[in-house]
Amino acid sequence: MHPVMQVPLLDLAAQYAPIRDAVVDAVTRVVDTQKFILGPEVEAFEAEVAAYLGARHAIGVSSGTDALLVAMMALDLGPGDEVIVPTYSFFATAGCVSRVGATPVLVDIDPVSYNLDVEAVRRALTPRTKAIVPVHLYGQAADMTPLLALACDHGLQVIEDAAQAIGATLDGTSLGTLGRFGCFSFYPSKNLGAAGDAGLVTVADDEMAARVRLLRVHGAQRTYHHEKVGGNFRMAAMQAAVLRVKLRHLEAWTEARRRNADRYRQLFAALAPEAPVTLPVELPGRRHIYNQFVIRADRRDALRDHLRAHGVGCEIYYPVPFHLQPCFAFLGVPAGALPVSEQAAAETLALPIYSELTAVQQQYVVETIAAFYARA
């Protein structure tokens, strides 16, 4: 095995270096205009990202969390309403349901894709169910065809949490354009990352698009005249300018991540064929964009510690499902009730997958994992 090598979980500096001049020019352009909130830069980004996604409307907002929140506000979800969400995701998926006063109904996931289990959703339906929030976790589509059919049969809204899935598709159609709303995050660690917080709402319905645009500016079409109680969900022009530069590179970065995923599979087969590790599965009809490359591993916590001790960045997404979080104890879902999610929380580990990752670095990651299990 090689001497200790530093392989970060994500290397934003490596991504930034070749586009530095373009990013600096874009930021300078915004500073020179002194137009920092919404405005022409945001409008241009909205048009460009809508074209990329094939979305009728793309509305820039302040974060991925706020994208979910404003979509739920636009649908008037609130007290007495139930919204079905996976118990295994980033906190905002369920947190936003609570913030609008609705009740998150937590259901289990599919063990292969880590996305919503459609039959679990079906069992969770009640007369109070108003919406379903499928999460395209780690960059791969949830099982949208039966979920959309179920929603249609029961008159439910579908809000896609595509925070980790920009550029991912299902049967050639961009995620975020299948449900009533699509919600994206441009947190810096995402495949398309801003220089801070930013997000996006996609929607085909003109009336709903107008409602989201109204709600993102405190419900005011004219300054100080408020038609609805909204929020400050405005995208900063600086973030839009940076995102416009990065959007031009997104497809190349995505394909590099996909190549890295293929290389991991080859390396594990060649260098660690006996390691008790399960690699992510790319399901038929889905373009996986690998926001994360998540393995399942025996003695996961010990492996994590070993990797970090040998310079390999790794992370657990996510160690505690929502039903075991203290803030959701009031829902009364006991430990053991959603076992697939609990098992995923105990076994999964994200490895480096960023587009600038080299073959040598990947080989070191796999050799380090093989060495851990060889000494057992």
Image (cartoon, rainbow, N blue to C red):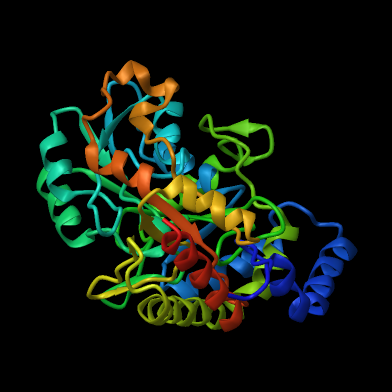
The percent position of residue 165, horizontal first and vertical second, equals 43, 63
The percent position of residue 66, horizontal first and vertical second, equals 53, 42
User: Residue at 24% across / 53% down in the picture?
Assistant: 111
User: Residue at 26% across / 45% down in the picture?
Assistant: 157
Number of numbered discs visible in the structure rendering: 0
Residue 158, compared with residue 279, is above or below; it is above
Name the image quarter holding the C terminus.
bottom left
Judging depth in this view, the residue of 211 and 358 nearest the camera is 358
The percent position of residue 90, horizontal first and vertical second, equals 45, 43
Q: Residue furthest right?
A: 32
Residue 311 appears left or right of 149 = right
The percent position of residue 294, horizontal first and vertical second, equals 42, 60
User: Residue at 39% across / 70% down in the picture?
Assistant: 168
Name the image quarter holding the N terminus.
bottom right
Q: Residue furthest front?
A: 375
Specify whether residue 152 is in view: yes
Q: Quadrant of residue 95?
A: top left
Residue 151, compared with residue 105, is above or below; it is below
Specify whether residue 86 is in view: no
Residue 187 appears left or right of 160 = right
Judging depth in this view, the residue of 27 and 195 nearest the camera is 195
